[in-house]
Image (cartoon, rainbow, N blue to C red):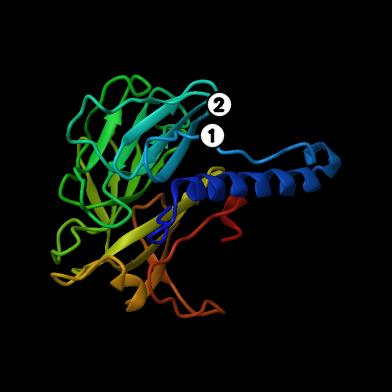
Amino acid sequence: MSPRPGTTGSHIVGRTLAAAAVLCVATAVQAQVSPQLLQGMQWRNIGPFIAGKVDSVSGANGQPAIGYVGTDNGGVWKTVNAGVTWQPVTDAVQAIRGITALAVAPSDASVIYAGTGSIFGSQYSSGIWKSTDAGAHWQRAGLSDAGAIAWLLVDPHDPDLLLAATRGIDHRKGGARGVFRSKDGGRTWQSVLAAGSESGATDLSWASDNPGVVFATVSQTYLAPGASAYSLYRHPGPSGLYRSTDEGLTWKKVSGHGLPEMIGPTAVADGTDSRRV
């Protein structure tokens, strides 16, 4: 997620949990389960309370009590008891500060990828980091010159195959902007969707049951020297929606057929079997 400036961490967690609740309700209706079963659910703030703004959240497949959050200037935090307590797991790595993207491999919960940066731009960015022991230790996983990492997707069956959406360095044209693909766990990367010299990839999405179809959004992320991130909202540039049918190898721009012209920072979410976007 890439929240607007001024959005609090609790709002981000709330939006994420709200999306999960909507999915649960939709699933319940589809399965003809009585809505009364959900009436006892209540919202509460589960922290972490001293970590700063929360910009990314990820769970661990098959381990409902384990969760991770990435904070804007406090690294990665982990809970092993469904949010009762939280512990920072990246404090030992000085280069890891702001976290803008988190992804736990669905097929191996010990493999975690963390994309660095800030919701306000590329400060604190040092590329992608990887842990193979559930957050105990971290090593670099490439794209150190890509600016803020907007989103990460890990293949449901292969923990070494992943896609990364990069925004680029704020006040520098060109560089590693767009969508990148790695087949070896971040050791090497291939540029698969170039965003141009002033734009970056701002979001990625696929349906977990059909990861071959991927959607990406591209919008202007370059800021003229002296400009702030707020200018992207006051004077937004053109945006685009792109689609891949081979798990990110090739891309085509989506346009027409009722899709309105997109202006400014955009995001995309994908539903079951990539049929609803």
Tell me where residue 120 sits by quadrant: bottom left
SS of the residue at dot 2?
loop
Question: Which percent across, then down, holds residue 145?
Answer: 15, 50
The reply to whether callout 2 and callout 1 are in contact (CB within 8 Å) is: yes
Q: Which mark is residue 108?
A: none
Q: Residue at x 38, y 67 (%)?
A: 265
Q: Amino acid at mark 2?
A: Ala
Depth check: 206 or 125 in front?
A: 125
SS of the residue at dot 1?
loop
Question: Which percent across, then down, holds residue 149?
Answer: 29, 49
Q: Marks 2 and 1: which is nearer the front?
A: 1
Residue 67 in the figure: left or right of residue 231: right
- Residue carrying label 1: 46
Q: Amino acid at mark 1?
A: Ile
Q: Residue at x 38, y 30 (%)?
A: 77
Residue 89 in the figure: left or right of residue 274: left
- Residue carrying label 2: 82
Q: Tell me if residue 176 can be seen.
A: yes
Query: Sequence-wise, which precedes: disc 2 or disc 1?
Result: 1
Residue 39 in the figure: left or right of residue 143: right
Mark 1 residue crowding within 10 angstroms, few (<14) / some (14–19) / many (20+): few
Tell me where residue 57 sits by quadrant: top left
